[in-house]
Amino acid sequence: MQYVLLIYGQEPSEAAPGDLMAAEYQEYGAFTDFLRERSAMLAGEALEPTSTATTVRVVDGKTLTTDGPFAETKEALGGFYLVEAADLDEAIRFAAMIPGARRGSIEIRPVFTVPSADGTGR
Amino acid sequence: MSSGAAHALVDRLFREEQGRAVATLIRVLGDFDLAEEAVQDAFIAALETWPARGVPDNPGAWITTTARNRAIDRLRRRSRLTEKIEALGREATESALQSIEPEPAEDAMHIADDRLRLIFTCCHPALAMDARVALTLRTLGGLTTPEIARAFLLPEPTLAQRLVRAKRKIRAAGIPYRVPPPELLAERLDGVLHVLYLVFNEGYSATSGDSLVRRELSAEAIRLTRVVDQLLPTEPEVLGLLSLMLLHDARREARVGPDGALVLLEDQDRTRWNRDTIVEGHSLIRRALERGRPGPYQVQAAIAALHDDAASAGDTDWAQIADLYRALRAMTPSAVVELNLAAAVAMADGPAVGLAMMDGIAATCELDRYPYLHAARADLLRRLRRWSEAEAAYRQARALTTNGAERAFLERRLREVAAAARAIDSRPN
């Protein structure tokens, strides 16, 4: 069996203090290692906050793009793709090609780049 | 040069050149904040040096070059603070900054591209509409955060926060800094024009708040639409929007009475309309329509042109205006267009015909919360001397309007029809 584990939680309004963040990254790192050792790790990423989200729907063949996360409570998460795209425009193009975009919504969330220990990007 | 004259020159230049300089620096730096800070530094430097040393031959190029140097300074300072910054990345950015060609004559196309890129980035559909508006005014227009906050009657921190979030989203979500490829251009251009029209309307329709700042908003929208027209000269809808803005703006002085109250189109003193602006609006819409690719802005401009042509409301070619609204309805069907069509038909064929159409619109309930539906119905009921029905409709309109000048106007009409209704009630049979 394969499972997707979706991580829900309060979004911090301010960035948490550096040492607190570092402690949490370490914990996540440890859990990832735990999965890797058992060959249980297939894919996983942290996400940028919902303020960076974009929602895409396709209505009558037209792509409708809106700022913000998907908020309808009646519709439930039905799956996900993790994709590599040049920029948001390409991600929107991919999203609009998903059949589910015609019946529901596709929420696009950028993958968060965890800062490396020396303060530069990954 | 006196420091006062230098101030005035820098102010004017800021409006005209800051968008240009910021756009170029954002392309190279990929960083809105650093670009804005560097350009601000450059204008401060201009204020300090120009009064003593005189204004350079090409002030715009001077600003871009100085901003480039300040950006390099800021990057160096930053890198000293964060010791571990990859020196290679910094050098690449620096050499890109050094390569910014300061001579606009040689680099005009590049700078033009930069501004166009910036407009499309600021108006990207993945940004909330209010963020697009704020970002466009802040980054491309020379408006400061306090000015924009005043214009939209928002607390300054709210607007500042909105700008921070928008810039963060551009960066984090990977909104591209480019002119959209051909397959996206039409749709994205619609989005840009929509933002510019919204800015214009915010400065034109609302008469509450700081009127000077609002005038500035409309002027800025017109200026930016001219820029888009220069950069995309083959798009008739850009000309259409520019014409539409000018033909409305020409009536600005006549729209508000000496007491600050709203004056309806039919009651305006048409000698106070700006003839030069109307002439320009006319020539623009003619040029646009000649291209044979009509669109909603062109049709609305044509309607405005017919209004501006008429010596009085009675002389207006209402039948042709009604036809144009039918054309607009075919392009962008909506209850609001339907309402405008009904109002034109009422003028062409009599209030009873128009009222029947408006009653049909009211029956759909779609415009229940739209004050202009109730105000327009009230006006036709008033013309038909159905006083108490008119009174009820004016009351609904008054309850829904958020604009002070409009409310004052509705109050006045409400008193008139209420008095007429009472006069009939008290008349002996």
Image (tube, rainbow, N blue to C red):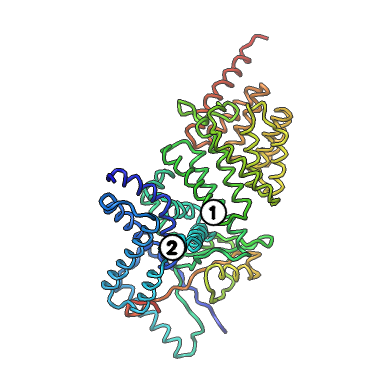
| Disc 1, SS | helix
Amino acid type shown at disc 2: Thr
Label 2, on which residue?
A: B24
Q: Image height check: is B115 above or below A5?
A: above
Do discs 1 and 2 belong to a common subunit? Answer: yes
Q: Is residue B338 left or right of residue A87?
A: right
Q: Is residue B234 left or right of residue B37?
A: right
**Front-most of B126 and A15?**
B126
Q: Nearer the viewer, residue A1 or A42?
A: A42
Q: Chain of mark 2?
A: B
N-terminal of the pair, mark 1 or mark 2, is: 2
Residue B20, image x and y in percent?
44, 57
Q: Which mark is residue B228?
A: 1
Task: From the top left corner, tell me how far across and down residue B65 is, in percent.
Answer: 36, 62
Residue at 57%, 46% in the rendered image = B242
Residue B127 in percent (x, y) is at 50, 59
Residue plotted at (42% across, 87% down): A34
Residue B152, by quadrant, is top left
| Mark 2 burial class by Cα count in 10 Å: few <14, some 14-19, many 20+ | many
Numbered badge on residue B394: none
Looking at the image, is B367 positioned above or below residue B107? above
Instruction: Count numbered badges in the picture.
Output: 2
Estimate the spatial distance between the alpha carbons at disc 1 and disc 2, rounded to whole Å: 16 Å
Q: Is residue B250 visible?
A: yes
Q: Please tell me whether residue B295 is drawn above or below residue A39 in the rendered image.
A: above
What kind of residue is marked 1? Val
Q: Chain of mark 1?
A: B
Q: Is residue A13 visible?
A: no
For label 2, the SS is helix
Spot occupied by residue A119 in the image (x, y as percentages of width and height)? 33, 76
